[in-house]
Amino acid sequence: MAQKDMTEKALEAHNDVFADIVNTLVFHGRKKILEDELEQGRERSVYQGEKALREQERDTSKYWRKNHIRIAYIGFENETKAVDDMPLRVIGYDGAAYRDQISCEIDEQGKRKKVLERYPVVTLVLYFGYKKHWDKAKTLYESLGSNMDRDLEPFVNDYKINLFEIAWLTDEQAAGFKSDFGIVADYFIQMRKNGTYNGSVSKVRHMREVLQLLTVLTDDSRFLKTIDGVKEGDEPKNMSEALDMIEKRGIEQGIEQGMKTINMLHARLLKDGRIKDLERCVSDSAYQEQLLAEFFHE
């Protein structure tokens, strides 16, 4: 599970990708956040569970700084399935980040002092489902449903998630991405529209990380297995080349598996002393198929 989490975070952890996602989705294409203004955020936090302390972890997060001053703390949560508890989870992440702002730190003299920085916390929920829209709770009220006493509503702050359905982004939004995240978005948009994907020839800067993320989000190991089998320097430069490699690898694996099956058939015929059948199946493909069905019908 930890390896899967690391793989999922790899692409978005790059500052150029992280800044691009925020600039495109939040600031409508304005290049407001620069790569060198981002620093790694504290993604793990602890809360009191029913019986013990428990740990929660964001998918990816960064502090946005200008002139050594924190402007904001921004986090991403990647989801492939809609869940009703998402508003509750986001409250937990955001609350922990705000709680950090009223904590104490040790100064140069070893004395405790209050942290004086105050900055907003923003969480973006990136939904990668493409077969249907997000159809679960988007606010705290929706999560609570009928458990919310209407007389309490004025005293319970509703809490909404900042949801972005990647497969349903407009053409203008999708075209706004300048980093490799545009490749990921294009994949899910094409899958929603066409049910298939044609790789682009646009150069990919972080190819391994793109294929890693697609592997996690699609649960299709072919993406990562393809890049893992490539020598350094021979990596595909764009998604069109990557798809060609995936197809070639699939063909090679099919041939390899086919040869193994035929060798097993030959060994079985030899073991049973069926030499004439062995000689015939070598030159008669139809008869070979008949024998394969006889021995490996399952």
Image (cartoon, rainbow, N blue to C red):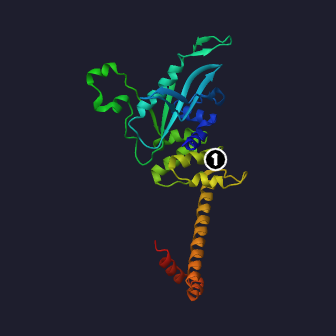
Residue 157: image location, x then y, percent: 37, 22
Res 267 → quadrant: bottom right
Residue receiving disc 1: 208
Please give the name of the residue rendered at 62% of the width and 55% of the height, measured from the top-left corner. Answer: 226
- The amino acid pointed to by label 1 is Arg
- 202 shown above or below 103: below
Residue 294: image location, x then y, percent: 48, 79
Q: Tell which of 110 and 205 is nearer to you.
A: 110
| Lateral position of residue 235 relative to residue 88, left or right | right
Res 10 → quadrant: top right
Please give the name of the residue rendered at 59% of the width and 32% of the height, measured from the top-left corner. Answer: 19
Asked if one can make out residue 119 in the rendered structure from this viewpoint, the answer is no
Q: Tell which of 283 and 186 is nearer to you.
A: 283
* SS for dot 1: helix
Residue 38: image location, x then y, percent: 62, 28
Residue 46: image location, x then y, percent: 51, 27
Please give the name of the residue rendered at 68% of the width and 10% of the height, measured from the top-left corner. Answer: 109
Q: Tell which of 35 and 221 is nearer to you.
A: 221
